[in-house]
Image (cartoon, rainbow, N blue to C red):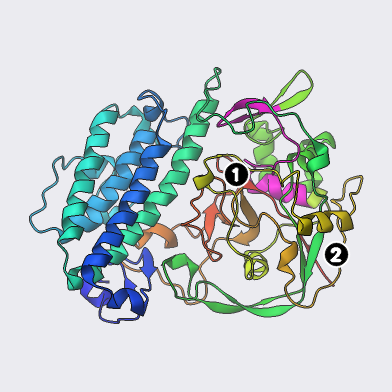
Amino acid sequence: MSPSAATATPKKVANPDGFGVVHPSSQSRSRPASSRNQDSLARFHEVRNFTTRLCQGLAPEDCVVQSMPEVSPTKWHLAHTTWFFETFILKKWMQGYCPEIPEYAYLFNSYYNAAGDMHRRDLRGLISRPTVDETKNYRESIDSHIDTLLSGADEKALAKLEPLITLGIHHEQQHQELLVTDIKHVFAQNPLYPVYRKGRDGALRRPDTAARCPYQFTNFEEAIVEIGHDGSGFRYDNEGPRHRALVPPFSMGNRLVTNGEYLRFINDNGYSRPEFWLSLGWTTVNEQHWQAPLYWTQHEGEWWNFTLSGFRLVDENEPVTHLSYFEADAFANWSGARLPTEFEWEYAAANIVIDGNFVESERFHPAAISSAPSPRSSQRCAQSRSGEGREVPGQGKRSSGIDSNKLQQMFGDVWEWTRSAYSPYPGYRAEPGALGEYNGKFMCNQYVLRGGSCATSRAHIRKTYRNFFQPDKRWQFTGIRLARDLA
């Protein structure tokens, strides 16, 4: 889709290659260009500066390590997000722009084949040049050019540039999350257990089971629901087209599964009982010798886990995280429940305000439900009963429609695995061009996750947001919410 075609229909301004779509409001279109210029620049610098903030405290040596093929060095994230603005905005829209170092186009392209050749992903850690300081200079140079371009844009040019700037901002926020999870994996390989940021609760925290709210389920009636983005504001193309879906009656867990509950699965020999596992999952468990979530280690009879605030005892009240789809599915089978579908999740989340433990809190770890809950949550906890044995506790009354006030931790903390394969919605077509490659070509052998995590930006997440990973991946902040069928 060409830029001119993208602006021909005033109700929908798409980027040239279909990666994301922005639907500007009439108020935005009617505002003076100078005010919109300032707003776009302010938002651009806000997000770019937060990336810089995430790198505070990291030494140059920290920024160049690649601990596995899926992990990229911090330096690469800094450069790639800059390459994105250079490639899809400056090269196309700034008259006379000439890259200072053309070779960066090869080094810092990720997988946009239409944008040119690229360096191998698994070899990014071998690139010592540009240095970290040179990479920072590259960011500053591109930011300066974006300043010049936006400051001088008239209303007509701004109408074409705003969607692209918004797209680049959301792309950078995705890489902010990857930067956090990747540096965690890098630090976890170091027997010194480096601290990224000191935790607010201290490096060591003893379990306090009294703070845990017992698990219960909220029931939802069968409904035909609208699924997908409604067209207001920014979205990725995989969030549409909006369509109707039949959701049979189901029940949804009122909160995320905790470390303490997952420990019961471990102690019941969950990792050595094939009846709970998918065939490929069972093969993976045995090949990889999994016995617990990623970053967990047993020491002197107690489970410890590596966090970005250091190595500490597992807090039984915190949401369990760093689990593969295989582990989440096995736990659900063990508990007598299942994982929700993405349609059930979106239906349940429809009336819930997006709030939670996001990257802006800079906690960088899932948070336990408060030990001093609100009166409403205290009443909910008092009405539920804990159970013993294999089955996760919880009894819920049948509700008429959505009773979403009973659902907690729907946003932030951990991405929630769903049982839905990542596939296109009815009517979906990937747009042509480099940015159109972003979503469509990955719709195979992956599962959908919903809700965001403690490393996700609050300004980036949406109720319709579809994250996706292969079922064996564990280095992201991924966790479990249970669901059940209702007759």
Q: Is residue 130 visible?
A: no
Pointer 2 with pointer 1, Cβ within 8 A: no
> Mark 2 highlights which residue?
396
Residue count near mark 1 (Cα–Cα under 10 Å), binned few <14, some 14–19, many ≥20 = some
The residue that appears at 44% across and 40% down in the rendered structure is: 179
The residue that appears at 49% across and 76% down in the rendered structure is: 230
Q: Secondary structure at mark 1?
A: loop
Q: Position of residue 410 (x, y in %)?
A: 65, 57
The part of the chain drawn in magenta is 304-332
- Separation (CA) of disc 2 from disc 1: 32 Å
Residue 472's mark? 1
In the rendered structure, which disc, 2 or 1, sits on the residue that comes first in sequence?
A: 2
Image quadrant where residue 88 sits: bottom left
Q: Does residue 389 appear left or right of residue 439 in this picture?
A: right
Q: Is residue 93 magenta?
A: no
In front: 433, or 464?
Answer: 464
Q: Amino acid at mark 1?
A: Asp
- The C terminus - image quarter: bottom right
Q: Is residue 355 above or below residue 334?
A: below
Q: Position of residue 427 (x, y in %)?
A: 47, 77
Q: Amino acid at mark 2?
A: Gly
Q: Nearer the viewer, mark 2 or mark 1?
A: 2
Q: Position of residue 183 (x, y in %)?
A: 47, 33
